[in-house]
Image (cartoon, grey):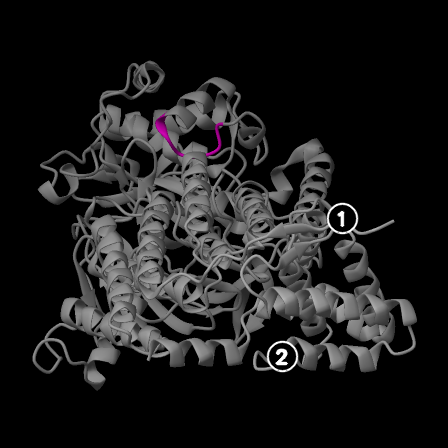
Amino acid sequence: MPRRLIMVSVAPQQGIVRVRDGQWRMTGALIVLVVAASTGLIGLIDGPSWWFAFIGISVLLLVSAATLRMLRVPRLLVPAIGAVELLIILTAAFDGGHAIGGFLPTAATFQRFGELSALARVSLDQQAVPADSLPEFLFLITLFAGLAALLLDLIACGARRPALTALVVAIMLIVPSLLLPTGIPPLALVACVVAYLLVLRVDTRRRSNGWGELGMSLSVAAAVTVVALTLSTTAPGFQQIGRQGISGSGILIGAGVNPLIDLGADLRRPVPVPVFTYTTTSRTTPYLRLTSLDQFTGTIWRHRDGSTKALPDDGVFGPVPGLSTAIASTKIRTDVQIQNMESAWIPAPYPATGVQGLQGSWLWNTADLTVSGVTSTSQGQSYRVDGLALEPTAQQLTDAVGAIPTSVSAHDLFVPFDAPSIIARTAATVTQGATTEYQKAVALQNYFQNDGFVYSTTAPVHNSYDGDSMQSIAAFLKVKSGYCVHFASAMAIMARTLGIPSRIGIGYLPGTVAGARNGQTLFEVTSDELHAWPELYFAGVGWVQFEPTVSRGSLPAYTIPGGASTGQSNATAPARSPGAPAPGSDRANRGSGTTQATAAQALGAVLSSVLVGLFVLVLLLLPAGARRWQRHSRLRLLRDDWGSPRLAWKELRQSARDLRIAVPDTQTPREFAARIAELIDSDANAQTALESLLEATEREEYGRPGQGMIDPDRAGELHAVLAALAAHAPLAARARAVLLPVSLLPQTDQLRGRARLTA
């Protein structure tokens, strides 16, 4: 049967003006893509300043790169010039007076950049999202946006592979998925996909193989969207309860979301992790506090920075806020060695009056005596804490009447106007008959301890009220089941409705005996001992700790008739047998549901691990899928009479590249065919098909316009040559060609050639 030939004309190449117009259209599409990606970052930082910085630096660098190409600057120099521009902008905006002329960086400039990065990490540790719009955050946002813009331009305009911009967008979307408690907003994902399709639409490199390139690009877009959705909703530690504070096998406290949520996530660990050990001269084992949370937004509790000062060389600081000399106290000394905890804060008994032995730069907070790192964390630290064991009596607390400092009343009495009525109503009911603030505080503690409340780390998650927001507190008061976060936040906000200043302390229970060190009892603290408790302010006494959490910790002596604490003395604290849960710890208090809860958690961890494994597998197979789609699309076009010989020849060249066969751009079709013929000389049918493909390609390449022919048998010829070529290659080469198709990337000689053309 004679071949059916279809004559097509070959379009002339676009002129230089058309190419430049296409570059500007691509730059415009990239700007739209950046704006769309920025919507995924909304909620990370307060205020609009970060957004203007993000968009401003991106637009400036993208427009600058397009202008350089219009001026015919060598293509490989464009990203280098862009990097210099970014450095100059960062220097002018964030240098702090060290630059030459205000914009030329010096060695001190890079030191300043390092300090800003370190400050950003500390600030992120100490804040929840949305974080305050601090200079260190603006620096990171500007740097992040600038690098993203340079990478987008390099991929789309420099390497001319717009489809791969999806990978940059995926990275930009992963950042908020790690930090935002609710993950990436769906509208942001939709906006990014639409903007990405716009980038593909204006791709000026699509010629006869346009549908194949578009199909590959759409497959990448779909895969990236699935990846972003998967990460934001299923990856371990990134569910809507917020990021779990897990760093390897250790503990990560205050990792950029709500520290109370980090605490809850660690309490749900199936297996506890040793965190630190300590010895103390205190007669009773103390709680070891990390920090306090006193700024309540109605949604989350935050640590208010207040006034911080550099830790003195001798490590001594103070005074203790609100404490009068009438309150009895005993000096104590505690030596701590951190094993598996990374935090901006160090655990220490409250109130601390000095710290020695810390490595790095540290600050102390005058409002709550918190010690936090500037460029250091608690991991691996060994230090000594000097402090006081306060011994206020019930009578002293009853008589504690006086003016409350403005620094306390201005922040620690705030209650949102839209607080659910059950909170104030319950507080008023349970304290009915109490006449002093101390009596009301004890009544609140007794209410939680004796009114049917149950300790559970799983009930809040299963019933969707895990957290410390007003709605979570209201639900907790109805269900009466939760863990320390719910008990502490509920009592703290209820105390505020009664006019008692309050805040939340987070840290660790005392732990259990693990041996001896230097003649003193050695205590070990694990992740099971993570805890939160309310602290209430009394005039002349200062901040006083209470314990509302049922079956956790110990009741303070000043809240018990007769003044005897329920806690263990240093000398009689129990030792823990290997593998046993800590007394009063999370595992010891889970009751009959422990096995089921642990099994459910283990199953959830396995399922999450499977999902992450599938995600990684999809990511690894993404190049193979894109290349397979591209080949399938081209073969379909050839079979359907839409593909020219040039399309078949391009597929043959790319397949050879995937098999790591040298395919220089300078090689003519006949030279390339001769190389392939040597490899498939044992297959006569493939040789005949190769000759037919070569003849048609040369006719299209070198003949007059209109000489190109489309032949429906071309797909069969191409398939025969590809099959023979694959049969020639060893198994390892074929597997590598499938899994790592290098033809998706531009050839280095192509890039050099383009650079010469634009020079």
Q: Disc 1 and disc 2: Cα gap in Å?
A: 27 Å
Q: Considering only vertical position in the picture, is 110 above or below 40?
A: below
Q: Position of residue 743 (x, y in %)?
A: 62, 68
Number of dots carrying numbers: 2
Dominant SS of magenta comes to loop
Q: Nearer the viewer, residue 59 or 50?
A: 59
- Kindly identify the amino acid type of the residue bearing the numbered disc 1: Arg
**Residue type, mark 2 in image:** Thr
Q: Which residue is mark 2?
A: 668
Q: Position of residue 368 (x, y in %)?
A: 25, 52
Name the residue carrying label 1: 4
Q: Is residue 467 magenta?
A: yes
Which element carries disc 2, helix, strand or loop? loop
Q: Using the image, determine if residue 494 lies above or below residue 741.
A: above
- Residue at x 62% of width, y 79% of height: 668
Q: Which residues are magenta?
A: 465-470
Identify which residue is drawn at 44% across, 39% down.
Answer: 555
Residue sitting nearer the eye, 627 or 668: 668
On the image, the x and y values in percent for residue 373 come to 32, 67
